[in-house]
Amino acid sequence: MSKVETNEERLERLLTKANTLPLRPGVYIMKNNAGDVIYVGKSRKLKNRVSQYFQNSQKDYKTTKMVASVHDFDFFLCDTEMEALTLENVLIKEHYPKYNINLKDSKSYPYIKVTTSEEYPRIIVTRSRGADKSKYFGPYSGAGVAYNIVDTVCKTLGLPNCKRQFPRDIGKERPCIYYQIGQCMGTCKKGNSKDDYSAAITTALRVLSGDFLIAKEELEKRMYRFAETENFEAAAKCRDSIAALEKISERQKVVSSPKAEQDVVALYSDDKCSVISVFYIRAGMLVDKDEFVFSADEIITADDIPTFLCGLYHTREYIPREILLYDDTDSESIEALGALLSEKANRKISVHIPKRGEMKNLCRMVYDNAAEKAAKFKDASERDNKMLAKLAALLSLEAPPYRIEAYDISNLGKEHITAGMVVAENGKLKKKDYRSFSIRTTSGIDDYGAMREALSRRLSHLSDEDGSFSLRPDLILLDGGAGHVSVVKSLLEDLHINIPVYGMVKDEHHKTRALSDGENDISIAREQSVFVFVYGLQEEVHRFSVSRMDSAKRKTLKRSVLEDIKGIGPAKAKKILKAAGTITALRNADIGKMAEMGISAKDAILIAEYFKSKEEDKK
C-alpha cells in the first residue's frame, strides 16, 4: 500500500520541481490530483514566479485556496513576454480553469453605424464593424444603450427611424404618427427638402462623435436663418432640437481633453470578490462603461490585467489609441500587451500607467467606481446568503441551496406540451442554464406525466462530465402542489437520487402561498425575502415555459398542413398551394379538378385521402 503524501511533502516536492525551471518567459499550468487544469498563469521568469506559490510565505485567501488543490504543474517556455501572453489566453479559453478569471459573456458588442455612403444615410445598430465607407461609433456595453442613443438622436433631430428606405419610398405612403407628433421631419413626403435631411445627418454625426458644442452652434445658425426668412415653424423645431441636445450632453460627463479617445481600466480586489471597471472615453466624454465582477475563487492581480484586456478586445473588436491602467502592472507585460493590441488593430496602441496629473485622477475615479460596485455586490450577496439560509431553515435542508432548479408545464390543449426549467445560483437567475423540453412520450393532457418525463430526461445527464446538466441541483421546485411533488419524488427514488423537492403552491388569486413537501404546506409569507425570491422564481419559470410553448406553436403555424401528408415536403407543399390558391379550394376539389390545377395524379390521390380522413375524424 502506497504511503499517503502529507501537505508538507506535497509542497516540498512541488517547490523542488519549480526550482528547476529556467529564468525565462513562459506559461505554467496548475493541475489537481485528478489531472484537471485549475489555473493558468504566465511569467517573464518562470522559476521565480512558480516557486513563490510553494514557499512558506504570506498569500491572499484565493491563492492559498488554489495552491491547496495543486498536485502537479506543467509549463511551456516562450521566447518573449508577448508570446507568453498570447499562449496564456489560448490555454485559458481551452481549459476554462476554475481559478482563472474568464470573460463568461462572449457576446459581440453593438456599434452605431451611419451609412454615409448612401444618398439618404441611415443610423442603425449593428454588431459587426465592417470595412466599408460607413461611420461607426462605439462599441457600447449593451444593445439597450446603443438603441437608446439612436432613438434619442433621431427624435431630437427629426430623422426617420423606421424601415422605409429613401429615396425609394418617398411618396409611396402617408407619413407615420411620429411625423404627426413632430418627432420626424417626414422624409417620406413628396417635396421635402433633401438639404434638411443632410443637415440633420451632419448634426447627428457631430453628436455621436461627442462634438455637442459644434452641433449646437450649427443648429443655432439654422434657427436664426429660418427666423430671418420668417419660417418660424422650422426655427421652433431647431430651438427644440437644441434643448434636447443639451439634455443628451448633460448625460455624458466631460472627463478628458476634447480629442481624447481612451479606455481607462482599474481593478479592485479583496477576499470576497474582484471587480474590473472600464470607462470608455470618446472625444473627451465618458460615453459608456463596463463592470466585470468575479467570484471569490477567481484569482486576479494587477499582472492579470493584460490577459483580461486581450479577452475584452477579442469580444469588443474596436481598440482605442490609448489605454490607461490604474494598477501597478509589470512594465514588460504592459509592453507585450501594447505590441499585441497594436498588431491586432493594425496601428499603434499606447498602454501606460499615469503617475500624476489629470490622467492619474481619472484612473482613480475608475478605481473608486470598481470599489463601489464591489461593495454593492457584496451587500447583495450577503442578502442573498441570508435569504438562502432562511429558505434552508424553513425546509430543514442541511445547507443553503446553492443551485436551485424550477420547473413548469405549459400546453395548448393536447399540442405543444412544453416543460420549462429555470435556474438560480446563489440567489441569482442564471439564464444561460435555462432549458426547455418538448414532451414526446406523455400522451394527452397529463401534467404529472409531462413533469416526470421532463425531470427524467434532465436527471439522466447528471453523470455527464461537463455541461450545465452535469451540475447537481441542491433543490428542485415545481410549479404545482402535492401531486407534482409525489410524482417527482417517486422518480428520484427509482433513480436512487437524493435531491429535496418542493411544490410552489398558489392561492385562489394565483399568487405564491406556500411550499409543499407532498404532504404538508410550509408557509413562506412571514419571511419576506424568501417569499419575494420564490414568487419571482415561480413567475419566471411560468413566463419561460409559456414563451417556449408559444414559440413551438408559431413554428407549426408557419408549416403547411400538406406537410402532414406522407411524400409531400415543404417545397412541394408550397408549389401545390400556389397552384390551388387556398387550402379551402384544395379541400373542395376532386382528383380531376386537382389535375386541372397541375397537381400530379399520385399527389392528388394522397391529398384527397388526407382530407377525407380528416372529415371522418370530425364525425
Image (cartoon, helix red, strand yellow):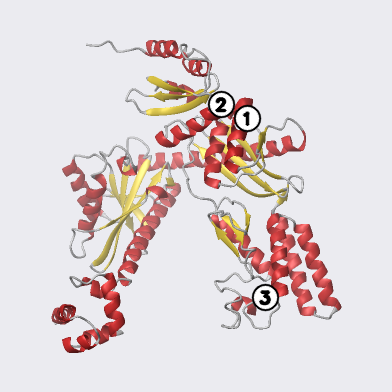
Q: On the rendered structure, is 290 left or right of 10?
A: right
Badge 3 marks a residue whose secondary structure is: loop
Q: Regarding mark 2 in the picture, which secondary structure is present there?
A: helix
Residue 573, given in percent of the width and then of the height, sits at 26, 75
Q: Amino acid at mark 2?
A: Glu
The answer to whether 612 is drawn above or below residue 307 in the figure is below
Residue 363 lies left or right of residue 270; in this view the side is: right
Disc ID at residue 601: none
Tell me where residue 1 sits by quadrant: top left
* Quarter of the figure with residue 159: bottom right
Distance between the alpha carbons at the discs numbered 3 and 2:
56 Å
Q: Which residue is mark 1?
A: 335
Query: Can you say which quadrant of the picture contains the C terminus?
Result: bottom left
The alpha-carbon separation of the residues under discs 3 and 1 comes to 51 Å
Residue identified by numbered label 2: 81
Tag 3: residue type?
Met
